[in-house]
Amino acid sequence: MSVLGIFEIGHPVLRERAHELTSDELASPRIQRLIDDMIETMRAAGGAGLAANQVGQTVRVAVAEVDDNPRYPYKPPFPLTVLVNPTIEPLDDETVQINEGCLSVPGLRGELPRSINVRLRYLDRDGAPHDEVRRGLTAGTLQHEVDHLDGVLFLDRVTDRRTLTTWEQFERFHRDEFVTRITAFTDRVGS
């Protein structure tokens, strides 16, 4: 396994829609190695997720995991999940404002609405289908990764640009309020 370079905002690959994988492509050593490398890269960077576009591959593969992540201490634990050809749909109109960052947009955060309740359909790395309902911050994380696969960055969804802040200023001026608000939200709706 290798830690891959993460492409940053401005690189055209981040604006491309990734293509679906066939069963044969998914089973190939190249894609299985890509999945392993993406997991290692996400963990090394301290991310909660990583999409293939972020490492320069336009295939519909993303990985997500939250396990005592110091970058996101307020996020509930979420086991390592490999998402192949994922689709996501809101189950209702309920949203929450989440302050997000991104490994491909280093040093910057902003608030955007995310659906609280979503249906997620995907294949795992072995090609087994999954159809799940996800809630709360976990739903937000998964929406973020599927957005990447559609060529969308979190900045595209920020509704009030005045919420944009560097990580340093977020930590200094905004973190405590956000953590208090999002912890109350998580306590109310679950993961």
Image (tube, rainbow, N blue to C red):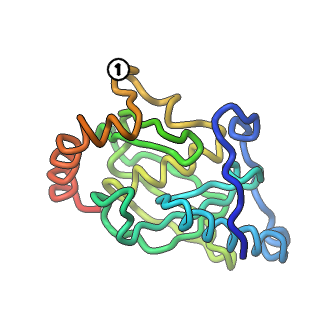
- What amino acid type is highlighted by mark number 1? Arg
Q: Secondary structure at mark 1?
A: helix
- Asked if one can make out residue 174 in the rendered structure from this viewpoint, the answer is yes
Residue sitting at x 69%, y 75%: 127
Q: Is residue 88 above or below residue 43?
A: above
Q: Is residue 182 above or below residue 64?
A: above
User: Is 190 positioned to the left or the right of 142 in the image?
Assistant: left
Q: How would you rate the neighbour count of disc 1 (Cα within 10 Å): few for under 14, some for 14-19, many for 20 or more?
A: few
What is the quadrant of residue 5 in the picture?
A: bottom right
Disc 1: which residue: 162
Instruction: Give left or right: position of 7 versus 157.
Output: right
Q: Residue at x 60, y 57 (%)?
A: 86
Horizontal and vertical percent for residue 108? 46, 36
Residue 30 in the image, given as x and y percentages of width and height: 84, 71
Is residue 95 among the parts visible in the rendering?
A: no
Residue 36 position, x and y percent, is 68, 74
Residue shown at the point (57%, 43%) measured from the top left: 147
At 48% from the left and 61% from the top, the residue drawn is 46
Q: Quadrant of the C terminus?
A: bottom left
Give the image quarter of residue 153: top right
